[in-house]
Image: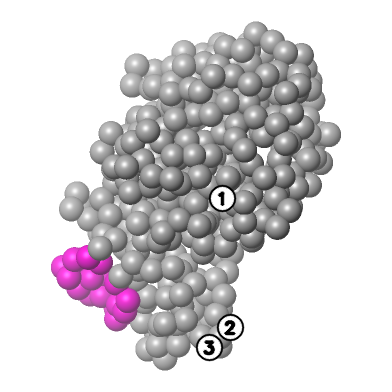
Amino acid sequence: MPKENFKRVFVLVMDSLGVGEMPDASDFGDVGANTLLHISENMPNGIYAPNLEKLGLGQLGNFKGIKPIPSHPQSYVMKLKEASLAKDTMTGHWEMMGLHTTVAQVSFTDTGFPDALIQELEKQTGHKIIGNYAASGTEILKELGEKQMKENSLIVYTSADSVLQIAAHEEVTGLQELYRCSAIARELCMRPEWRVGRVIARPFIGTNAGNFKRTSNRHDYALSPTGRTVMDVLKDQQLMTSCIGKIGDIFNQVGVVKTQPTKSNEDGMDKTISEAINGDYQGLVFINLVEFDSEYGHRRNPVGYGEAIERFDIRLGALLKELKDDDLLLITADHGNDPVFAGTDHTREKVFLVAYSPSFLKGKLLPERNAFADIGATVLANFELEKEPHMIGEPIVELLND
């Protein structure tokens, strides 16, 4: 086994919790976006997050309710810029693990999917396709869910992401049939002109437009990473890569040793706490908490988002108590999704990084860094492993020299 400073590194992604516009935000139509700031301003009393506060998060902005604590010796805080030219989940996570994306994935936000793709999907699945436009997943169920049930058709829709989503009733169409059709769509969307980053099966339940609800049986069919990642290097060295939430789907299971799906942010945190208590191994625990993005960011619900942060903070307190002296916890985000911004798209933002270990003595505010990939580079340096030539990112040496 390689040597290490820390035996385990936990990378915990609060999906979409950006902390202010990137320098190139104007290229994405996102000038003025600041997810965490605007959430805090829309909470009546600000965000109550004492654990994030004591770790120093308040030093990164004027967030209502989260005071800037100048002394936090057990944690380092900083902002990270995104080097890749995108603002989606896949690109953000791939960059954390060393990949630099210079060409954004194809998207069909304004036009819907081409007729040729829809016709081929109908032919190969045997189902009529309805929808085919950019929409909120919950709103399109209100609009087309009853029609889908009556016809046993498939609701196809997209967003500002590079994604093709297929919604069908879990009991009328059936999960396995939805998965079969989604796998067909993934194969079709391997063609360069239709090459979306993800195809997502979106099952729902309910009897009418007033009570339709998406279930936790979502399944992502992602592209494999464009190159070897930090997780591949770790796995090659017989180190653990334990993935919680949709991490396995984001990486199409490449470089993944162990994966655990989650039903909610709380479930994701409970599994992370369990891993902290019971995971006796060297390696990486990589966690994504998707509900911040899917349930509150895209739905433009700043108060719901703020309350979700507060619930997270409670479980963060429980996690901190279980971490050992040779554990490193890195809390971050993968892009922004400002819930008071126009539209329902992600926003091009910097993200925060909070680094905590019970063994730290010199924690402080650090200068802004130039890539999410510094996370992965730090993981490799921790285990005295070299990044591969195509990988970007530089180790955060303060975390390894404390």
Answer above or below: position of 376 versus 387: below
Q: Nearer the viewer, residue 66 or 277?
A: 66
Residue at left offset 46%, top offset 75%: 139
> Is there any visible trace of residue 166 in the rendered image?
no
CA gap, disc 1 and disc 3: 34 Å
Which residue corresponds to mark 2? 211
Task: Please indicate, yes or no, whether residue 51 appears anywhere in the rendered image.
Answer: yes
Depth check, mark 1 against mark 3: the one in front is 1
Q: Which residues are magenta?
A: 111-132
Labelled disc at residue 38? 1
Q: Quadrant of the N terminus?
A: top right
Report the side of 62 relative to 18 (left or right).
right
Q: Position of residue 172 (x, y in %)?
A: 49, 83
**Judging from the image, what secondary structure is the residue with disc 1 in?**
helix
Q: Secondary structure at mark 3?
A: loop
Q: Which residue is denoted by mark 3 in the rendering?
A: 208
Is disc 3 in contact with disc 2, using a CB cutoff of under 8 Å? yes
Give the percent coordinates (x, y) of residue 328: 68, 25
As rendered, which of 54 and 141 lies closer to the eye? 54
Q: Nearer the viewer, residue 201 or 370?
A: 370
Mark 2 residue crowding within 10 angstroms, few (<14) / some (14–19) / many (20+) = few
The circle on residue 248 is none
Q: Nearer the viewer, mark 2 or mark 1?
A: 1
